[in-house]
Every structure is written in structure tokens, then in C-alpha cells.
Image (tube, helix red, strand yellow):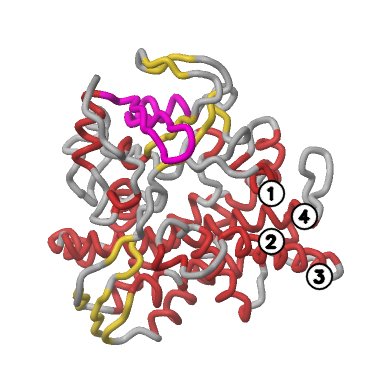
Amino acid sequence: MGTVMDIYDPELYLSGPIHQIFADLRRTQPVYWQDMPGEPGYWAVLKHADVSLVARNPRLFSAEREGVILENMPPERLEQTRNMLLMMDPPRHTEYRRPLAEHFKARVIGEMEQRIRELTRALLDTVDGDTEFVHDVAGVLPSQVVGGLFGIPEADWPDIRQWAEQSTSQQDPDLVGDFDATAEMTKMAIYAIQFSMARREQPPRADLTSLILAGNFGGKAMDDLEFGSFFTQLVTAGNDTTKTMLSSGLQLLLEHPEQLAALRADPALIPGAVEEILRFANPLHYFRRTATADTVLRDVEIKAGDKVAMWYTSANRDEDVFADAQRFDIRRNPNPHLSFGLAQHFCLGVHLARLEGRVFFEELLARFPRIEQTGASQRIRSNLNNGLKSLPLHLSR
């Protein structure tokens, strides 16, 4: 029996991801049992190869059966999530993803570059001097991009952003406040249902909403309730993870001034820097699966019904895959990080996230020759979200 560590405790992640603990466990207990308060614990899968194996076997490791977070959801909440791509297994996942995949191809997303650049420039026009970067800058752009993608009226973009942020911050009392997460998600779904009902009465437009409403999903059109779940997941995913990539990314560059200087000198390095940011500061620590049958992973017996967590924060620092894995290196190549997932659930918005990251850092570094951190950053209290909730900066032109 190896060392016992509580890697579930959200408090553990407040001072930063627990990389030394993960490094020790990868060496000694790479499939690690973790107890949970008040319900069954889970197997934390910590090696790159094993995370890949779990991701590639949806029949044995199901996203649909009990969802993708460690905490078991009540049946009615689980039912509400059934129409989220994230929580579907093949063949249903394939039927729902295929009609959208064309719209998210690199060529199609590439046509959005000018619009994203315009939004970025307009956002940076509002910044000069002291700013709280996470909320006032990094959190704004993704909601604008996703809002435009769906054809959501600009006046509603702040609401969309607020719902998305709150739904992913449930372990942090500072961010939760007095709101009810389920109620907030329901508000977002109701907005989406009403939005889809209104759009059905209007002529089709060149946006994602029209594409979805006209699509064939498993031999039928998507109804308004299904659209509500679909919308909630895509908007939340497109907002929160990108906000984290931009804010954590800038903090990393400030902590590595020689690499920041290299990016300023040669913006062609930015796409590689975005990949290393995603490896080094992956926006989500894990996603869960549920074993559908008894199996064995690295000589560990996993029983049918057991929770299995694919721990990206550990896999992205696996010494068997990444040379000098604990070092941030914008020139790292190859960089087979798992931050976008793998196989069937490989992130639908991967090209959009990469485009937003590249354009944002190109514009930010060109606009502000001096960027200084003016106080301590604060992390989100969460074992799921690997991000910042504040980053005080001074930016000068």
C-alpha cells in the first residue's frame, strides 16, 4: 500500500495544481483510489497512456451512465444533462456530433479570424492602466465569440457569460455567493429554449443556431428542450475554458519573461505557445467515466459501476511522454497534451480555441509593450476547474 493523499479536497488546489503529488503517484500508484465524503470514491487515472486508453473505450468507460463529474448527480439533474454532447456515448454521441462537425472544421473557423480580431481590438481599447484581467478582459472575449457564433443578441452576452461562469464555480464560496447552481443552469436552458422557439419563426441565418435547428440528429430534428441542453453545454464549454487559457496563459508568460520576450520578437511562436499553455495549465483537471464492466488497468481491479477519472493535469506532465515535463517551454515539439480530450470526445471547438488564443496574444502583445502583475493572483477553489479568479495587472501602451 502506497502513500495516501487526498487529491479530492478542493482546498489542495488553491495554491496551485499539486504537481509533485501527482509525480509521486504516477511513479508509485498510477491508478489511485481516492475516497470521497458522503459517496463512493473513484479511481484517479494519472498516466498519459492510461487516460488515452480510458478515453478511447467508451463502451467500457461510459460518460452517459453517470455523467462526467466526480459527484453523483440526483436522477433528475442527470436526466437534464442527457442531451449534452459531453455526456453522450456512441452511437448517440456520433449522431449528435456529426451534423455540427462541418461547422467547426479548421477552414470554416478560420473564416472567423477577422471578426475575432475586431472583437479583441475593441476589447483591448477599453483597457489602459490597472485592470483585473480575469474578469475584465479574459472572460469577456469568449462570451462575445460564442454569442456571435450562435447569433445571440449582443445585449444578452453578459447574461450568457454570468451563467457560464457560475455553473463551473460551484466549489468556490467566493464565486458561488448565494446562487443555486441548478437554478442558474435552468435559467440558461430556459433562455435557450425561448431563443430557439423565436428563431424557428425567423428566416435561417448563417450561424450555429440555424445549423442546429435545421440539423438531422439521429434521424430527427432537435426539439427545443434538446436545444436547451445542447446550447448550455456548448456555451459553457466555449466560455469558461477559453477564459482560463487566456488568463493562465498570460500569467505563465509573465512568470517566464524570457519566453514572453521571444513571443514579442517573433509572433510566429504564438501558436506553439498556446499549445504549451494548454498543456501546462489545462483548464480542466479531469473528466469522469463510469466502468460498465469489471476490468483491470495496470494490475488494478476496477469493478462495474466504479467511477474512473481521467486526470489531465497529471497526464500532461507524464515523464514518459514529455521531456523535462515540469518545465514551461513555448518551443516544445511535439506536444501531445490531452487538454482537448481524445477520441470521440475530442473537443469540438478545438480550432476555435486555438484561433482565439493566437489572435488574442498577437493583439495583446502588439498593443501593450509593458504588462506587469500588481498583486497576488487568486485561484478558483476547485478540483475540476484549473483556473484563476483574479489576476491584477497594469498594462501600458
Q: Are marks 1 and 3 in contact (CB under 8 Å)?
A: no
The one of 140 and 294 positioned closer to us in this rendering: 294
> Which span of residues is magenta-colored?
29-55
In the rendering, which numbered label is found on residue 80? 1
Q: Give coordinates of residue 303: x percent, y percent.
A: 50, 18
Q: Give coordinates of residue 102: x percent, y percent.
A: 64, 48
Using the numbered discs, state the Cα–Cα distance from disc 2 to disc 4 in whole angstroms: 8 Å
User: From the viewer's perspective, is 348 left or right of 45?
Assistant: right
From the image, tell me which residue sits under label 4.
225
Q: Residue at x 57, y 39 (%)?
A: 67
Label 4 CA crowd tier, 10 Å (few <14, some 14–19, many 20+): some
User: From the viewer's perspective, is 246 left or right of 183?
Assistant: left
Q: Secondary structure at mark 4?
A: helix
Q: Residue at x 26, y 78 (%)?
A: 368
Q: Amino acid at mark 4?
A: Leu
Q: Give coordinates of residue 264: x percent, y percent.
A: 22, 67
Q: Secondary structure at mark 2?
A: helix
Mark before the other along the chain sequence, 2 or 3:
2
In the rendering, which numbered label is found on residue 94? none
In the rendering, which numbered label is found on residue 198? 3
Q: Is residue 50 magenta?
A: yes
Q: Give coordinates of residue 163: x percent, y percent.
A: 56, 66
Q: In the figure, residue 182 lies in which quadrant?
A: bottom right
Mark before the other along the chain sequence, 4 or 1:
1
Q: Is residue 1 above or below residue 314?
A: above
Q: Are marks 4 and 1 in contact (CB under 8 Å)?
A: no
Image quadrant where one finds the C terminus: bottom left
Q: Is residue 308 above or below residue 255?
A: above
Q: Are marks 2 and 3 in contact (CB under 8 Å)?
A: no
Using the numbered discs, state the Cα–Cα distance from disc 4 to disc 3 in whole angstroms: 14 Å
Q: Are marks 1 and 2 in contact (CB under 8 Å)?
A: yes
